[in-house]
Amino acid sequence: MAEYDYDVLVIGAGPGGYVAAIRAAQLGLKTACAESRETLGGTCLNVGCIPSKAMLHASEFFDAAANGTMEHMGIEVKPKLNLDKMHAQRRDAVKGLTGGIEFLFKKNKVDWKKGHATFQDAHTVKVGDETVTAKNVIIATGSSVTPLPNVEVDNDKQVVVDSTGALELASVPKKMVVIGGGVIGLELGSVWRRLGAEVIVVEYLDKLLPGMDDDVRKEAAKIFKKQGMELRLSTKVTGCTVKGKKATLTLEPAAGGDEQTLEADCVLVSIGRRPNTDGLGLENIGLETNKRGQIETDHDFRTKVDGVWAIGDVVPGPMLAHKAEDEGIACAENVAGQTGIVNHDVIPGVVYTWPEFAGVGLTQEEAIEKLGDKAKVKVGKFPMMANSRAKTNHEPDGFVKVIADAETDRVLGVWAIASVAGTMIAQAAQAMEFGATSEDIAYTCHAHPTHSEAIKEAAMAVQGKPIHI
């Protein structure tokens, strides 16, 4: 009789968890995955990345027809919004993709254990009413919305909502206040602005998109203001009251000052996410979290408890689905005795607004800090308005910025604002993964006319030989 029920038990079936489970099974390990949702795929597939992109994509078509973009190109249409149908196509996309994960589990012989998982000891986990033992346990429980003090979310009422509730609004609010100028707030705020809402973004910091390059953050404010969003930066929300279908927020300057009030039909709370570790029973195995609620691991994703591993949003690093996926593969390979590798210095991030914002590697500020001298950093920028494809597509907003080490010419970071920046950034990430210099990018032939030529042009600017600017 086997000592354990499974070689590997993965807790959580989000992008990190389901990928780890599939890879472990492919490597010949008897694998189970515990998931408390009714469907697989975690936040990303169910209420995050995928459904938000379905709404972003659909709302782009509506906006292009409504704001005159299509008319400018000789296509005269008058759009009529069918919000129920727009929601239906979103739900259909989610259903197809989550069902696809279930198919992959069956194909790779991964057992789906349905229920909430709690450690009894390092190798014993209670999942619902069942107790499962495993030689190795991988924690991949993801993250959830960070609450804001004095602002109570109630998605059912659709007045004060989080990102999940913002996907399900039954009608377009007349006025929406988005608390938080990060990725989620700007993406979902963009959806409802395109569909007709007045959108006000309240951000505690003095710029949008924390963590991105400063030039990108400055340009973001210009772009969103031009699109009609009102930005209240350096402002904090101190409270919220709801009466009927209206919310009243109390605000004050982040540095302190006179209180103001702001009324809205809908308030979206999007100030970040926090690791899901509550209820896991970590205390039963002697595993503590750090000050940010994360589980610390070594380079191979081992925790300090033998046989227990952790990946994704519950460990330090950016809370990104693709980062979790790569860690899931690497962790499974490490469990199997192979060498799993993730280069955490090269993880791209994308904001899927219009245009898209994307970056990989160091910001200019981080590069200067790392190298210790501004003179040791070379920067090249190229505006999208000078890119032939962007110009013919009437997409002039944005730029590409390449940051390189002045001594070695090695690329340290690439930042882009463009309609397809999320696709363009893949080239930069691949180049950086293999230690490319700006000269390597500049000498790589790019197809014409494409948006990606802007990356080459920015690299040429780093080389001191710009052509089209």
Image: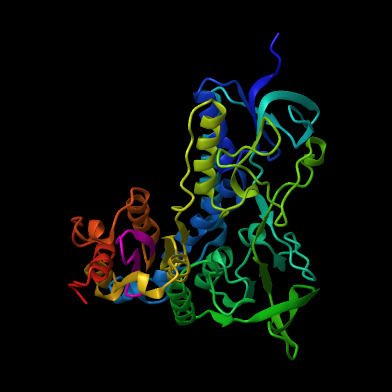
Asked if the magenta segment contains residue 406, the reply would be yes
Does the stretch in magenta take in 355? no
Count of all numbered marks drawn on residues in the image: 0
Q: Position of residue 441 (x, y in %)?
A: 25, 58
Residue 464, given in percent of the width and then of the height, sits at 22, 72
Relative to 346, residue 3 above or below: above
The quadrant in which residue 247 appears is bottom right
Q: Residue furthest bottom?
A: 258
Give the residues drawn in magenta, as a range. 395-414
180, above or below 435, in the image:
below
Residue 96 showing in the rendered view = yes
Q: Quadrant of residue 260?
A: bottom right
Residue at x 57%, y 75% (from the top left corner): 197
Residue 78 visible (yes or no): no
Q: Nearer the viewer, residue 96 or 350?
A: 350
Residue 53 at x, y percent in the picture: 49, 56
The reply, left or right, for residue 71 in relation to residue 30 is left
Query: Residue placed at 51% from the left, 66% from the top?
Result: 81
Instruction: Pick the residue in front: 362 or 455.
Output: 362
